[in-house]
């Protein structure tokens, strides 16, 4: 990747991370809401639900554009292989975010049209294909973040707080649904702060590289 393209990719990385934050803030449903509560929220707060879906879809695109900047931190350093695997796995999770956003839009449409009731939603949420997709998406997203954090700890190319925040983000996954909105906000803010730190480190590294026009990686 050309060093003069790194700032654009890094900017996309920050924008994508903040889009996830805004999407989380727009979420009208509390973590761990019951089926009835979710249906009620979607029907009453449809605009916020759509806004959340839009932000998730936008985050999917911009995070993917920002991943090349992440890879520039590992040129010729320890953790390069782990970083490549981590970015590849994370990219699958990021792409899955746009699919999840489309699923949210479709879900709202069925609720507004009255085609989905409480007992039907419970049945749909346990359908094997849907469960497989959701588990694969979550595993790819969080697994990729975990591998990137490990690679950063191995390479030492960022401040130590950056991979530590990524580890906090991953570690909170089992508890976020039980700790409410505050924990959910802390989790996504840790993600956004860490990826901002990655973007800053990538731009700093590119600024130290000679503007030769040759690829960095």
Image (spheres, helix red, strand yellow):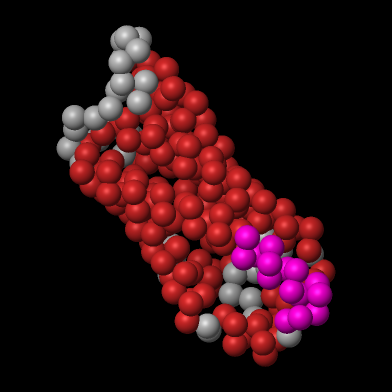
Q: Quadrant of residue 121?
A: bottom right
* Image position of 211 (left or right of 11): left
SS majority, magenta: helix
User: Which quadrant is home to the N terminus?
Assistant: top left
* Image position of 47 (left or right of 150): right
Work out whether residue 149 can be spotted.
no
Question: Of residues 95 and 81, which is closer to you in this image?
Answer: 95
Residue drawn where x is 79% and y is 58% of the image: 47
User: Which quadrant is home to the C terminus?
Assistant: top left
Residue 20, above or below 171: above
> Which stretch appears magenta?
102-116
**114 drawn magenta:** yes
Work out whether residue 86 can be spotted.
yes
Residue 78 position, x and y percent, is 17, 37
* Image position of 175 (left or right of 119): left
**200 drawn magenta:** no
Q: Quadrant of residue 2?
A: top left
Residue 205 position, x and y percent, is 33, 22
Total marks placed: 0
Residue drawn where x is 47% and y is 48% of the image: 191
């Amino acid at each position: 990747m050309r060093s003069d393209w790194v700032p654009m990719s890094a900017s996309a990385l920050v924008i994508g991370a903040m889009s996830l934050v805004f999407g989380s803030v727009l979420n009208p449903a509390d973590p761990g809401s019951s089926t009835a509560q979710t249906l009620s929220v979607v029907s009453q707060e449809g605009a916020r639900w759509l806004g959340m879906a839009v932000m998730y879809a936008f985050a999917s695109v911009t995070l993917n554009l920002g991943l090349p900047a992440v890879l520039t931190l590992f040129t010729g350093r320890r953790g390069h292989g782990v970083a490549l695997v981590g970015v590849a796995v994370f990219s699958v999770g990021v792409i899955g975010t746009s699919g999840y956003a489309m699923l949210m839009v479709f879900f709202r449409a069925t609720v507004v049209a009255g085609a989905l009731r409480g007992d039907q939603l419970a049945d749909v949420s346990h359908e094997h294909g849907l469960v497989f997709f959701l588990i694969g998406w979550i595993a790819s997203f969080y697994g990729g973040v975990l591998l990137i954090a490990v690679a950063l700890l191995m390479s030492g190319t960022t401040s130590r707080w950056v991979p530590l925040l990524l580890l906090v983000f991953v570690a909170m996954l089992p508890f976020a649904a039980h700790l409410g909105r505050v924990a959910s906000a802390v989790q996504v803010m840790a993600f956004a702060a860490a990826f901002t730190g990655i973007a800053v480190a990538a731009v700093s590294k590119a600024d130290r590289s000679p503007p030769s026009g040759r690829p960095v990686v």
